[in-house]
Image (cartoon, grey):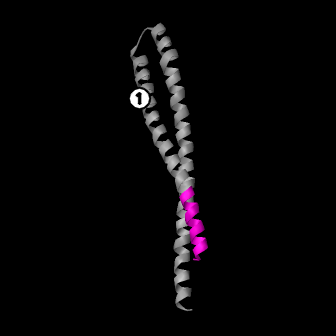
Amino acid sequence: MEDYLEKSLEEWKEDISEVLDQINNEYEDVKKELKVYSYKYGITKQVIQSTVNEEIIDNIREMYHKPFEEKYNELKEYIRDLDEKRKVFQMFVNKIDEVKRKEAPRTDLSASYK
């Protein structure tokens, strides 16, 4: 592979890798927050199931359960989007590496015959 091409691909890979790192960091943060809301949502659901007083149940649903459920579902959707972005940007990195691997032997072979 020609030096300019290899250098260009490597620079592009570094740029893509930076974006991928940012996505991975955000993914981990959202994953932690999702875990928190998973517990909060689960706990309020259990408390509601164990409570008999309808007025208390309504208050718990309004104050905690519905907001936790909404946030939990929002975070689940967001983490799916981030996961898709991770896969796409990882594909870029993999394809760049693949091209560099495939092209490297050709350069070596052609250089040895000159």
Most frequent secondary structure within the magenta stretch = helix
In this rendering, the answer to whether 23 lies above or below 8 is: above
Q: Residue 97 placed where, x, y %?
A: 52, 67
In this rendering, the answer to whether 15 lies above or below 2 is: above
Element carrying mark 1: helix
Q: Residues within 10 Å of mark 1 (few under 14, many from 20)?
A: few
34 vs 46, nearest the viewer: 34
Q: Residue 108 placed where, x, y %?
A: 52, 83
Left or right of 29? Residue 81 is right
- Reply yes or no: does residue 7 show up in magenta: yes
In this rendering, the answer to whether 108 lies above or below 44 is: below
4 vs 60, nearest the viewer: 4
What residue sits 55% from the left and 61% below the top? 13
Q: Amino acid at mark 1?
A: Tyr
User: Can residue 11 be seen by looking at this rendering?
Assistant: yes
What residue sits 40% from the left and 22% below the top? 46
Q: Residue 114 placed where, x, y %?
A: 57, 92
What residue sits 41% from the left and 10% below the top? 52
Q: Which residue is mark 1?
A: 39
- Reply yes or no: does residue 23 show up in magenta: no
User: Can residue 91 be seen by looking at this rendering?
Assistant: no
Magenta stretch bounds: 1-15
The image quarter in which residue 6 lies: bottom right
Left or right of 34? Residue 77 is right
Q: Residue 93 placed where, x, y %?
A: 54, 60
Give the number of callouts: 1
User: Which quadrant of the figure contains the N terminus?
Assistant: bottom right
